[in-house]
């Protein structure tokens, strides 16, 4: 499992497949690159797939400050620069979508295409940001078991597959309480990306689980209306993590889109 030192902290990332076209997978909170295990296997036959972990989640080193989208975008950019990757299809799910917006603002030339999954462009309300601070403190005080109890039901469809429940809990358990807190505080600081949507010129696909209660399909529909030429795919039988709950439909949507870019 490679790591890279971006100058300030070591980032762990997965790097599989050897195709000339690259897909970058940006994970959700409070998980890590392991949430993409099915996609890493399914896409690597044709593409090189890179999936980093954010600080203090998965195997990436913790940093002392909040994991702001600014810091994360700097890390991803440094990682890709180090690998000499200057074009990629960028896929961001939820927090990964927030990060993709920041990356787009910094380096739109990187994007061969963009896939926004189960995410939203807006910033937090003051109440939402305060709720994240409370969550961050609880995570540090009560630990990852508490984080898994809080988050797992929200991430999955109302009647989830028990095996996926176990998998999500295990992924959360592989982080650190401080990494979870840093991610919450970083998300609380994110800016409103709604104006960014109108600046996106690369081919864009929006994907949403039909049973997503955190970022419901209505959010996805709004985004599609604001990104020129964007298409929407709704994934039945999935909540906030369609890549884990309905991987066949999710992978097909992504591969159809990615293969279309390669023509
Ligand atoms: C995620 O899945 O990344 C989170 O639900 C995002 C958030 O808390 O806003």
Image (spheres, rainbow, N blue to C red):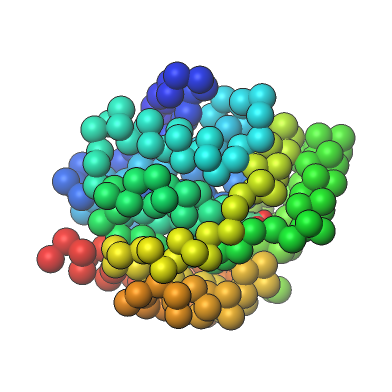
Q: 246 or 220: which is nearer to us?
A: 220
- Within the image, what quadrant is residue 65 found in? top right
Residue that appears at 82% across and 51% down? 130
Against 75, residue 228 (above or below) is below
Q: Give the image quadrant in which the ligand numbered 1 is located.
A: bottom right
Tell me how many marks there are.
Answer: 0
Residue that appears at 66% across and 46% down? 189
Residue that appears at 60% across and 40% down? 68
Against 169, residue 119 (above or below) is below
Which of the image's four quarters has the C terminus? Answer: bottom left
The percent position of residue 91, horizontal first and vertical second, equals 40, 56
In the image, farthest residue toward the left? 263
Residue 139 shows up from this direction: yes
Residue 39 shows up from this direction: no
Against 232, residue 133 (above or below) is above
The percent position of residue 105, horizontal first and vertical second, equals 41, 50
Left or right, 142 with respect to 239, comes to right
Q: 211 or 102: which is nearer to us?
A: 102
The percent position of residue 1, horizontal first and vertical second, equals 41, 29
Left or right, 135 with respect to 9, comes to right
Against 13, residue 96 (above or below) is below
Q: 260 or 158: which is nearer to us?
A: 260
């Amino acid at each position: 499992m490679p790591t890279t030192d971006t100058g300030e902290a070591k980032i762990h990332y997965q790097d599989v497949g050897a195709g000339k076209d690259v897909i970058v997978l940006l994970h959700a909170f409070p998980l890590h690159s392991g949430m993409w295990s099915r996609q890493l296997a399914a896409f690597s036959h044709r593409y090189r797939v890179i999936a980093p972990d954010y600080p203090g989640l998965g195997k990436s080193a913790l940093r002392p400050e909040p994991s702001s989208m600014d810091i994360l975008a700097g890390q991803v950019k440094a990682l890709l620069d180090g690998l000499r990757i200057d074009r990629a299809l960028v896929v961001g799910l939820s927090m990964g979508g927030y990060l993709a917006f920041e990356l787009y603002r910094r380096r739109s030339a990187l994007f061969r295409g963009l896939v926004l999954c189960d995410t939203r462009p807006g910033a937090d309300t003051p109440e939402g940001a305060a709720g994240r601070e409370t969550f961050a403190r609880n995570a540090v005080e009560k630990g990852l078991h508490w984080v898994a109890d809080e988050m797992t039901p929200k991430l999955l469809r109302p009647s989830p597959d028990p095996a996926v429940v176990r998998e999500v809990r295990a992924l959360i358990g592989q982080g650190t309480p401080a990494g979870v807190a840093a991610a919450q505080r970083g998300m609380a600081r994110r800016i409103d990306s709604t104006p960014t949507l109108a600046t996106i010129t690369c081919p864009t696909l929006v994907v949403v689980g039909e049973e997503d209660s955190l970022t419901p399909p209505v959010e996805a529909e709004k985004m599609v209306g604001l990104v020129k030429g964007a298409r929407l795919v709704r994934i039945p039988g999935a909540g906030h993590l369609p890549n884990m709950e309905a991987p066949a439909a999710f992978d097909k949507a992504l591969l159809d889109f990615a293969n279309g870019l390669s023509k």
